[in-house]
Image (tube, rainbow, N blue to C red):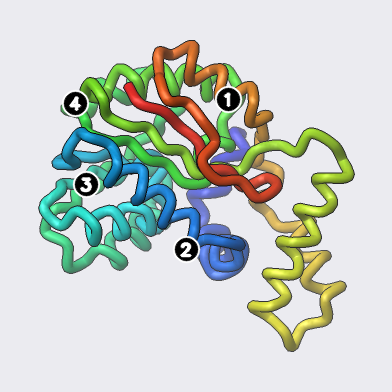
Amino acid sequence: MNLSEVWKSAQVTHSYLEGVRAAIPLAAEQIDVLLRLLHANPRPITRFLDLGCGDGVLSAAILSAFPSAHATLLDFSEPMLHAARKRLVNSPHAAFLNLDYSDPTWPTHLNGPFDAIVSGFSIHHQPDPVKRRLYQQCFQLLAPGAMFLNLEHVSSPTPWLESIYDNLMIDCLHGLNPTQPRTAVESAYHNRPDKAANILAPLDAQLQWLRDAGFTHVDCYLKIFELALFGGRA
């Protein structure tokens, strides 16, 4: 079974959203930088795609900043889409699509082009060849000058740096659960059911994949250890 299938579990989804996702450091700063890039880009945001939307946190922020924009939120996990629908229940400009983007035909179900495509902590669950194909497909779905922004979990260059990232995440999780012993939080972090679904790729390689797909202004716009916001313009 594809390990990413764990995300179809309501229990795993709830545990992630209430645990690891809620503890991500600099979450507000990540979204602020993403919005700054969208505001700075000359192309107006009228339609955007949220790829692997999760609970819709990125779409909610973009719709708040661009209230006349129309969002398409795509995810293969119905529990995640349920959480996104709850978050955006009062938004008249949000459409939801239960679709698996590991299927090479997924773009045929969409009406492009889009003025932006965003993704948050989703694409790293795919094997590297699928990541590369996704970047190429995103480029083809974007209007000229539109941006692709990927807020992502990337691999560490060395085990030492990976250990520092792990300790940061454990500290953040412990901050959410201060009554639990840190050792218990650490054990839960290393043994969480979704960890096996992570297929992390180096940041430098992914930046090159974006350039190979045709993107310009490719860069990492914010990074803290294994958490990176990167992308480019079509």
Which of pointers 3 and 2 lies earlier in the amino acid sequence? Answer: 2
Q: Residues within 10 Å of mark 2 (few under 14, many from 20)?
A: few
2 or 121, nearer to the observer: 121
Which of pointers 3 and 4 lies earlier in the amino acid sequence? Answer: 3
In the depicted structure, whether residue 176 falls above or below residue 106? below
**What residue did someone put label 2 on?**
28
Residue drawn where x is 70% and y is 47% of the image: 225
Distance of mark 3 from mark 1, alpha carbons? 25 Å
**What residue did someone put label 1 on?**
206
Distance of mark 1 from mark 2, alpha carbons? 24 Å
Residue drawn where x is 56% and y is 18% of the image: 208
Specify the quadrant that holds the C terminus.
top left
Residue 114 coordinates in the image, percent (x, y): 22, 31
Distance of mark 3 from mark 4, alpha carbons? 12 Å
Distance of mark 3 from mark 2, alpha carbons? 20 Å
- Residue type marked 1: Gln
- Residue type marked 4: Gly
- CB atoms at circles 3 and 1 under 8 Å apart? no
Which of pointers 4 and 1 lies earlier in the amino acid sequence? Answer: 4
Residue 62 coordinates in the image, percent (x, y): 28, 53
7 or 146, nearer to the observer: 146
Which of pointers 2 and 4 lies earlier in the amino acid sequence? Answer: 2
**Is label 3 or label 2 in front?**
2
Q: Residues within 10 Å of mark 3 (few under 14, many from 20)?
A: many
**What residue did someone put label 4 on?**
112
Residue drawn where x is 15% and y is 57% of the image: 67
**What residue did someone put label 3 on?**
71
